Image (cartoon, rainbow, N blue to C red):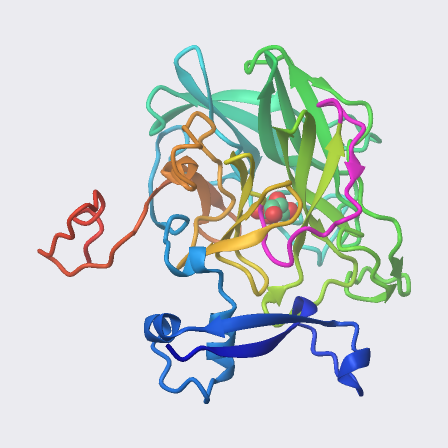
Amino acid sequence: MKKIKFIIPVLIGLSFFSCEKKADCKHEHVKQVELTDEKQDFLGITNKDKLSAASKRALLWPDELLHGNDWFFKYETYDLKGDLAYEEGVVRRDPSAIIKHDGKYYVWYSRSTGPSQGFGGDVVKDKVFPWDRCDIWYATSKDGLTWKEEGVAVARGKAGEYDDRSVFTVEIMEHDGMYYLSYQTVKNPYSVRVKNQVGLSWSNSPNGPWTKAKEPILSPADNGIWKGEEQDRFAVIKKGDFDSHKVHDPCILPFKGKFYLYYKGEQMGEAITFGGRQIRHGVAIADNPKGPYVKSPYNPISNSGHEICVWPYNGGIASLITTDGPEKNTVQWSPDGINFEVKAVVKGAPHAIGLNRTADNEKEPTEILRWGLTHEYKNYNYQYIRGFKTSRMQYHTAKGVVKKGSEFSVKNQK
Ligand code: AAL
């Protein structure tokens, strides 16, 4: 068998450094890849001596991913019934995960009413975004399809408090008989440069009453410097860390005896990079659910993504990365909750997912995604909560062809 070894330079973070002398170059990782006849055949490479850049990248893919499809899924969305069906004049968005209590599913979400005026007018009085002037509401359901809105769980704070303008984009964590809601907070006025923080409330029942933390549990990094006084979030002297402007989409998971608060960072002077908006995720870790949460020195822990969607799997943490950045629409996994690797590239994914935390998430990598909640834009002003379901696709077969051993073959035919 003819074996050829290729030295493939892997550039860290896809940055294109140039080094005068190869030996002096600190930025390169060099990986030896063996191109066997089998691998050549599997990848369909015409000539071992003439590898395109794409074939060289394909040779770096781990065998486990090359031959498996365990993390891949496809999805569809559907309308909900009852109080969560679309209602004119009402914004319901960013559903939390779903939990079950006394035979009923529970979900929390951002709720506001009326259209948004944007930032052109009086930001003290106007509603600038659909997620501005929100309170956190909750709903229950017997079957996950028809929902009853139960009312406010956590309201905005009193004038002058850190959360007096909007409380929104909430997540639920149930731990040791206690319930914790983590969510975004904004203080009036909601200008384009306003910093967004993360708040926390807790209760011994999902029906409340909820006790609010006196201070935010997470704040943006304070090492960015705005340029000038004008309300322009792109004008900076220094951008600062990936989360120097906003800490968003909090989700706390108990992990390895601690509490991992995953969040989306938005940076002052946010750029448009080759993958879209420059959005990355971070994690902050605490010994207790109420904190204090300390940001990981390894942040950011993703180079892409938007709303946080994380779940425990196989002793580590899985993460669905959507919407922004070069690794959007990938499912990733990390053994330590910090160092994530791509496991699958999906065709698309629901946004702002509310995961079904009652699922047996260890059954298969994406079992927790079999059904859940998402939101969709009816238009710029109004969003509503919808359901989604996914299925795995192990084989791609034509109609009428049944591949033996595949429980999915019939359902997933095109
Ligand atoms: C979302 C989240 C955050 C943003 C906005 C409302 O889906 O990423 O919550 O602030 O959009």
Query: Relative to residue 396, is residue 104 drawn left or right?
Result: right
28 and 186: which is toward the camera:
28
**Quadrant of residue 336 within the rendered picture:** top right
At which x and y percent is residue 342? 53, 55
Does 138 appear above or below 241? above
111 and 41: which is toward the camera:
41
**Quadrant of residue 25 within the rendered picture:** bottom right
At which x and y percent is residue 377? 46, 50
At which x and y percent is residue 124? 77, 44
Does 260 appear above or below 334? above
Residue found at x 83% / y 61%: 239
Q: How many marks?
A: 0
At which x and y percent is residue 413? 19, 54
Magenta range: 287-307
Q: Quadrant of the C terminus?
A: bottom left
Q: Quadrant of the N terminus?
A: bottom left
**Quadrant of residue 257 within the rendered picture:** top right
Identify the residue at the far front of this view. 1
316 and 370: which is toward the camera:
316
- The secondary structure that most of the magenta stretch takes on is loop
Res 288 seen here: yes
Q: Does 166 lie within the magenta span?
A: no
Res 88 seen here: no
Query: Relative to residue 276, is residue 4 drawn left or right?
Result: left
Residue found at x 79% / y 48%: 194
Q: Does 299 lie within the magenta span?
A: yes
Residue found at x 60% / y 50%: 340
Does 376 appear above or below 159? below
